[in-house]
Amino acid sequence: MDWTSVQKNIIIHIKAVSKLKFIIFKERFIKMQAKKELFDKYNDQDIQKFTLTNDNGVSISVISLGATWQAFNFPDKNGKTANVLLSQASSKEIMANQYFCQAIGRTAGRITNGTFSIKGTEYHVDQNEGNTTLHGGPHGFNTQVWNGSIEDNKIVLEKHIDSSEDSFPGNIDVKITWTLDDDNTATVTYSAKSDADTLFNPTQHAYFNLSDANNVYGQSLTIDADNYLELNKDKTPSGKMISVAGSAYDFRSGQNIKNGIDDMKASVGHTYDEVYVINDHKAENPIATLSDPDSGRQVSIFSNRNALVVFTPDDLDGVKFERGAGVPHMGIATEAQTLPDTPNHKGFGDIVLPAGEEKSYSISYKAEF
C-alpha cells in the first residue's frame, strides 16, 4: 500500500471538509449587518445614520438629512479600508455646502427659467440659481429630513412633499431605498407617486475620490458616451448634442482625469461640468467606470437612463470634509439621470410622472479592489 498517497488523500479530504464547514458557518452566522444610530441634530431634529455592512466588510452609510450618502467604505489592494466619498462630518456642514453626495429631486440638473409644460399646461417653479431651477429648486430632496428605517437589510427613506412646499405640480410621495450585496454593489432606487402630473428625474450627487491623495489627478474615468450636450452660459442645455471625438470630452477609451482637466482648460477655459449622452447599452454593462491604479480601487456605475453629469469642482476652499480641507479637484461628481431640462427639448427623454402612477429609477455602484 502506498501510504504517502493515502496520507495525501486524507489531508485533501480534511481540507475539503473544513472548507465545507466554514461555508456552512458563513451562511448561517455571517450575515449582512444593519445598524441605525444618531448622526447629530439639525434644527432640533434628530438626524439618523443607517449603515449596511456585507460579508466582505464593505459598507455604506446614509443619513436622513438630504438622504445623503455618507460613506462607501471598501479596501484598497493592500487591504486598507477607506471611505471613497467626499463626506462631511456634520449636518451643519452638509447644509452649508449643499449637494455633496445628497439625493437630488424632483429634477436633477437645471430647468430653463424654471418653466416647463406638461400636456399643454405651463408651469413655473421656484428658481434658485439666477433664472434657473437647479436640482429641484430651493426646497429639493436634499433639503428634506427623511423618515428612515432599516427593513430586511435595506435602508428605506420616505417623504411626503406637498406642491406648496417645493412649487412643483402635485403632492408627491417618495421612497429612496439603498441595498448592498455581497458582490460589493450598492444600489439606490428612487420611487415616487403623485396626485397630479409632475416631473421626476432623481439622482445621487455622489462625489468620489478613490485614492488617499487630496485630489483625483491619478485616477482614470471611462464613459460610454459618443456625445455631450452643448450648454448655454447659464449651463442650461441649448438642445444640441456634440460628438466627443478628438476632444477633451472623450472618455470612451478611458482618460486620466488630470490630463482631461488640463486639456479642458487649454481648449475651453474651464474644468468639467458636463452632461454626457449615454449610448444605448445592455443593463449588465456600466455607463462609467472610475479607477485608481495606485490603490487598486474601482467603482463601476450602472444606470438605464440616458445621461451622466460629470463635475470636477475647483472652488472647494472653505469646505470641510472628513478627509481634510477642500482643495481644487478633491473629488469628481458623477450624476446618473435622464438628460436635464427634458421637457424643454424634444428627444431628450420623458420624465413626466403621471398622476396616480408609480415610477422607479435605480443607480448601482460596484466596488472592486
Image (spheres, rainbow, N blue to C red):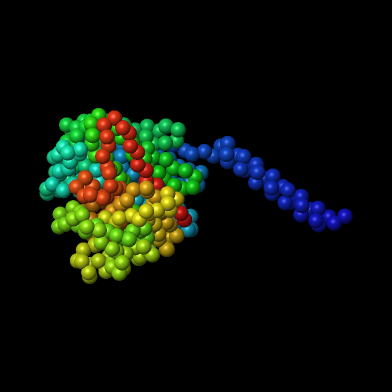
Compared to residue 173, the image places residue 215 above or below, namely below
Q: Estimate the x, y position of residue 239 in percent, counting from the top left.
A: 20, 54
Inspect this view and state whether residue 209 appears.
Answer: no
Which residue is at 88% across, 55% downward?
1
Q: Position of residue 230 (x, y in %)?
A: 21, 59
Q: Residue furthest left?
A: 131
Image point (60%, 39%), residue name = 25
**Residue 105 location, x and y as percent?**
26, 41
Q: Nearer the viewer, residue 4 or 196?
A: 196
> Which residue occupies the foreground of this view, 147 or 235?
235
Residue 163 seen in the figure = yes
- Along the line of sight, the residue nearer the viewer: 362 or 188: 362
Q: Position of residue 302 (x, y in %)?
A: 39, 50
Q: Residue at x 14, y 39 (%)?
A: 122
- Residue sitting at x 26%, y 39%: 352
Q: Along the line of sight, which residue is nearer the eye, 51 or 153? A: 153
| Residue 127 sits in quarter | top left
87 left or right of 95 in image: right
Q: In the rendered picture of this protein, how many numbered marks are placed on residues? A: 0
